[in-house]
Image: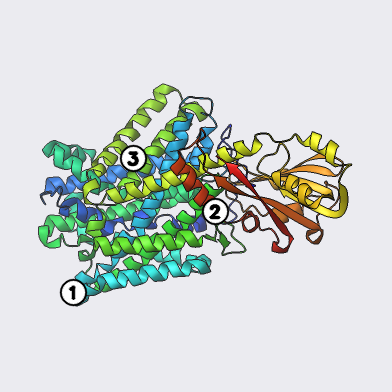
Amino acid sequence: MSVAPTGIATTATEESHSHHPQGLGRLALGAIGVVFGDIGTSPLYAFRETFANPHHPLPLDNAHILGVISLIFWSMMIVVSVKYVAIIMRADNRGEGGSLALLALVSGQTKTRRWSRGIVLLGVFATALFYGDSMITPAVTVLGAVEGLAVAAPAFGSFVLPIAITILIVLFKIQRSGTERVGLFFGPVMLVYFTAIAVLGIMSFVQTPEVLFALSPHYAAQFFLIEPVRGFLALGSVVLAVTGAEALYADMGHFGRRPIGLSWLVFVLPALMLNYMGQGALLVREGAAALESPFYMLAPEGLQLPLVILATAAAVIASQAVITGAFSVTQQAIQLGFMPRLRIEHTSAATAGQIYIPLINWMLMVMVILLVLFFRSSSNLTSAYGIAVTGAMLIDTCLLGVALTRLWKWPLYAALPLLGLFFLVDGAYFLANLTKVPSGGWFPLLVGFIIFTFLTTWSTGRKLMIQRLREGTMPIHIFIDSAAGAASRVPGTAIFMTSSPEGVPHALLHNLKHNKVLHERIILLTVKIMSQPYWPEGERAKLDDLGHGFHRLVLRFGFMEEADVPSALKRVEMAGGAFKMMDTSFFLSRQTLLAAERPGMSVWREKLFSWMLRNAESAMEFFRLPTNRVVELGSQVEI
């Protein structure tokens, strides 16, 4: 191993280091195309499922319809507008957002606390839940959009599943080529989509203008007073209207807080609410006759097929954003030490964030297609949808509590009422979604627990392995004094990569033992992944001259950066001259783990960690080392 994460620590909030050269309007348009796809496609199924779900059927009367509209509106205001846009998005880690970035930001303030490990585990579990969400979102959005064929052209109803699966397969297959070119069309397509659903909503509610009264919280409160139990259960479907809210925070690094907030408040929120009020007005007028698909029935008959095509395009864009998010979260997890090294391909020379991870892509594709085949309809899939999202939202609120009280030093009288409101809303949604566990909600929880086990096993195993490697390590100055004059020196540079900036690397000891020579210049190189997304280029390298041609070099990278070691070495000229790759050899140590009855992890987790280590990408590929300049030396380690 040659990555030594610093852990997750930072000491203070920082101003964003992201600089967006484009104008605010252009960034806001880009945000509409990328950030709001998930929440933007919720009208396809959210309103329908609140009334049509067999677990909590609601009467189609004015009180319930207005109550649901009111719940959706106030959920968007509290969860999205206040919690994410106004508050959480201020907790940026050098401009980056997302559960791992928030965890990296706040955990430094809790590392001396007894409950600091609990905070870290919560953040890791939120990441694990994200993967469950990233499997369900493409399935439910694409299937929900294509199901409009059964409304627009009933004769094609039997082709819904094959068409949805075909679209999903094509979507995952194009990931390797990158999304930079396709992404240029995301903004305009979503702009047309949001405009269309807003216009359709207006056309409907002008015929039944009383639905405007639903914006009053009075109707949301009355909804629970009429039927408390069914009202609570209905929250499990109402929350579908705000799924995707966490994407605003996760994508903050690409667009910035102001453009995302502007596009949400000025354009996306009004468009969504106009459509939901239009669907409500349609149900007020036509009742159960429109319940099959109130979204598509808003459109005149001749426009339903074009609406299906437009909604399908929006669903593909929403799915693309989630897949890209899975790649980004995986990269962060690898860099922060929660996941083994995986092959990461960069699909754009100009944009660092454009990456493709083959293993994640194909695993997601298989799981998404299995979900479509198993559940067969968006209505069935919504039973599995929501638990992962609400769980992640609840964890974000926990991390926000630490940020408010420990990071920003808010007084308790100001922080507690706000946190109380967020915990009440998020807790109610999460508990309501737990009632879906028997009918499909078990799936994201199962995925979350499996991935959580993998993430924590890798993190703990790495720490144990590094600890075992350090045991009995010879101090470097003793080694230099004894070996420098005794061994023959040969021309060139040898770089020994080590996870510890202390002691003698095992690869160096093995090389001296077997080859009985030392190079003229020896670099003990440690790569550290820092707890901020980007590290200043001027502070990338830290070098110590140990004497006799030995140098200890530490290269620092942010957790959003590619750890390209040769590129970084080109900028280091203070270790006896510039590095020439043709005169440089990289020595890596490859560990073989032996599961042993030693304190640390249970044997089954040790075996799991050993399997993950064997299947991780080699350090040579991960650090972009020249293949013809690498020597690997093996060793055995008991954990």
Q: Residue at x 25, y 42 (%)?
A: 434
Do callouts 1 and 2 mark residues in contact (Cβ within 8 Å)? no
Give the image location of residue 314, x and y in percent: 36, 64
Q: Residue at x 10, y 49 (%)?
A: 59
Total of numbered circles in the picture? 3
Pointer 2 or 3: first along the chain: 3
Percent across and percent down for residue 187 are 45, 63
Q: Is residue 504 visible?
A: yes
Residue placed under numbered mark 3 in the picture: 78
Q: Nearer the viewer, mark 1 or mark 2?
A: 2
Q: Is residue 226 left or right of residue 542?
A: left
Give the class, few, some or many, for how many residues have Cα within 10 Å of label 3's Cα (few <14, many ≥20): some
Q: Distance between the Cα atoms at labels 1 and 3?
A: 39 Å
Return the residue at label 2: 614
Q: Nearer the viewer, residue 498 or 534?
A: 498
* 2 and 3 marks in contact (CB < 8 Å): no
User: Counting residues from the N terminus, which is met first, the one under dot 1 or under dot 3?
Assistant: 3
- Dot label at residue 154: 1
Q: Secondary structure at mark 3?
A: helix
Give the color scheme: rainbow, by chain, secondary structure or one colour: rainbow
Q: Amino acid at mark 2?
A: Arg
**Image position, residue 145 (x, y; %):** 29, 65
Label 3 sits on what residue type? Ile
Dot 1: what SS? helix
